Amino acid sequence: MGRFDVRRRIEQLDPVRDFLEIYRLMSTFEFPWDMNQALSFALFRTYAVPSIGGQLARTGEFTERAQKRYDDTVLILDAVVEHGPGSEDGRAAVRRMNQMHRSYDISNDDLRYVLATFVVMPIRWLDDYGWRPMTEVERVASAHYYRELGHLMGIRDIPQTWQAFAHCLDAYERAHFGFDAGARAVAESTLALLATFPPNHRLPAALVRRISLATMDGPLLDAFGFPRPPQALRTLVRGGLKGRGRVVRFLPPRREPYFARQLPQIRSYPDGYSVSELGTFPPGCPVPHPRPGRPESTAAPV
């Protein structure tokens, strides 16, 4: 198996029709580490929108049970990738997402922005640090994968292309990034959690925090009120990530898929788990939302 065999396989597929297979090949063969890093840091961008970060803080889940919330998020999304949205586990994962989202008053705009981070941030991460960038086929397939997931979540007005997702993300951040004390607490809790992940746990937590901040851009740091790291540190950290990408390019290709559930930092379920039991189960009925077609509707099916 050659280093570029998977890419050649992807290039033979139709990104509109075969988006699930392409996305699965990308995330489990070509870029499993990079995709996990990109999506982990995508979470920080969602916290920087006060209506999202503040809501997460009020639940207490991401500050008091950060490990479990991280694990649940990863495992729910992983079930859809591994088994497909039409499978039993895939349907259970989407149902869990919708049940949790409908328990809170979350706007359609916020949900659409979160969806955009999952399309755009892996593209930008791989452009900067990957052993190769995403091809156009992969970018188109990723957009179609998340469009499908967004439709299943009941999100309206989803961008049509990966370029439109990028425009949506950038415009939303310019308009909505801002400081919120609760969001800052969620970000701090997540930074502390990252310091416990292998192999980060071998380093001082303060150093892991400084490295993590060095990967963040200015607007994101400013939204949290984080200090901007020295330029020398930013150059060192980002140079190290670029160097890793160049090394990985010459490593043997992965021969078996590596799913997110296999990550060593997933630690909440040593005896296994059921997808239908992941996540939170807030008491009471889902909050009322506007009907489809009216502003700020989040009419996600459950």
Image (spheres, rainbow, N blue to C red):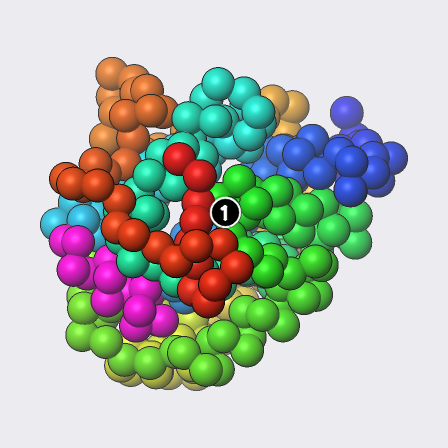
Q: Is residue 218 left or right of residue 147?
A: left
Quadrant assignment, res 127: bottom right
**Which residue shows up at 49% across the image and 54% down it?**
292
**Which residue shows up at 78% across the image and 36% down it?**
17
**Which residue shows up at 60% across the image and 22% down it?**
256
Secondary structure mainly formed by the magenta segment:
helix
Q: Is residue 153 above or below residue 209?
A: above
Quadrant where the N terminus sits is top right
Pointer 1: what residue? 154
Quadrant assignment, res 197: top left
Whether residue 38 is visible, yes or no, is no
Whether residue 47 is visible, yes or no, is yes
Q: Is residue 137 left or right of residue 274?
A: right
The x, y position of residue 30, in whole percent, is 65, 39
The x, y position of residue 204, in whole percent, is 21, 57
Q: Is residue 195 above or below residue 50?
A: above
The span shown in magenta is 47-60
Secondary structure of the residue carrying tag 1 is loop
The x, y position of residue 43, in whole percent, is 39, 57
Q: Is residue 161 left or right of residue 236?
A: right
Q: Check disc 1: other Cα within 10 Å, few if <14, some if 14-19, many if 20+.
A: many
Q: Nearer the viewer, residue 101 or 143?
A: 101
What amino acid is at disc 1? Gly
